[in-house]
Image (cartoon, rainbow, N blue to C red):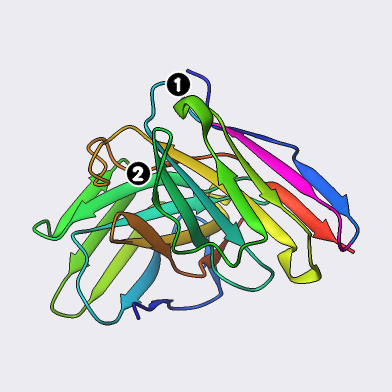
Amino acid sequence: SQKIEQNSEALNIQEGKTATLTCNYTNYSPAYLQWYRQDPGRGPVFLLLIRENEKEKRKERLKVTFDTTLKQSLFHITASQPADSATYLCALDRDDKIIFGKGTRLHILP
Amino acid sequence: EAGVTQFPSHSVIEKGQTVTLRCDPISGHDNLYWYRRVMGKEIKFLLHFVKESKQDESGMPNNRFLAERTGGTYSTLKVQPAELEDSGVYFCASSQEGQGVPILGGYTFGSGTRLTVV
């Protein structure tokens, strides 16, 4: 079955630096991959979607890459801010539904 | 526009009781999904409606779970009888696109219902 691994449960980054989160998956390659942000007590909030034929997607301070050969996506937040602290979820499509990773808790230290 | 609304936000029930969760998707969204996160695990798919029809219910844990979406608007998820392992956060999500691949990107999630079975 499809497995998604996000590199670490928690990540501490100094404010102003670039935070890089990793998502690795096994088995088949999805048509697209999504990244979500989740704050405590809230549902996931969609951030970015990248398709299999796209190498990179940007949105403001966010950048996502998608390497179907490595079966990996990287999620970058540049010029990180304490308000970026949250859990970030990687999600892949499979048969008209999405499969989530466990997420990485990102802490931006002031 | 209003987002996805879930009710109640929290529910504490005793083992063996019945609980009904409700989800109001974004108006006009044909696709409605239920997901669940149990402690320490990833968010997992339960089922998918397209309008009032169940497109995929492969994630439903067992026959104690019943989902409905009468009229293709709001949806309910009933757990009867509830067991301890049903505790978790139940999320509802909706999307507009017809073939499951988001055109605009992403799904809109509600804030979830935290269910605790004691």
Q: Is residue B93 left or right of residue A92?
A: right
Task: Please give the residue where the numbered disc 2 appears in the rendered image.
Answer: B106
Q: Is residue A23 above or below residue A1?
A: above
Task: Please give the residue where the numbered disc 1 appears in the rendered image.
Answer: B27
Q: Position of residue A12 (x, y in %)?
A: 56, 69
Q: How many marks?
A: 2
Amino acid type, callout 1: Ser
Q: Residue at 37%, 58% (x, y): give it.
A: A98
Q: Quadrant of residue B88?
A: bottom right
> The magenta stretch spans which residues?
B15-24
Residue A14 in view of the camera: yes
Q: Is residue A77 above or below residue B3?
A: below
Q: Quadrant of residue A55?
A: bottom left
Q: Position of residue B84 (x, y in %)?
A: 80, 69
Q: Name the chain letter of the residue that bears numbered label 2.
A: B
- Identify the residue at the far left of this view: A53
Q: Nearer the viewer, residue B48 or A27?
A: B48
Q: Position of residue A75 (x, y in %)?
A: 34, 61
Q: Is residue A35 left or right of residue A27?
A: right
Distance between mark 1 and mark 2 Cα atoms:
16 Å
Crowding near the residue tagged with mark 2, few <14, some 14–19, many ≥20 C-alpha atoms within 10 Å: many
Any magenta on residue B103?
no
Q: Main secondary structure of the magenta part?
A: strand
Q: Is residue A53 above or below residue A27?
A: above
Amino acid type, callout 2: Gly
Quarter holding the C terminus of chain A is bottom right
Q: Is residue A74 left or right of residue A16?
A: left
Q: Name the chain letter of the residue that bears numbered label 1.
A: B
Q: Residue at 34%, 59% (x, y): give it.
A: A76
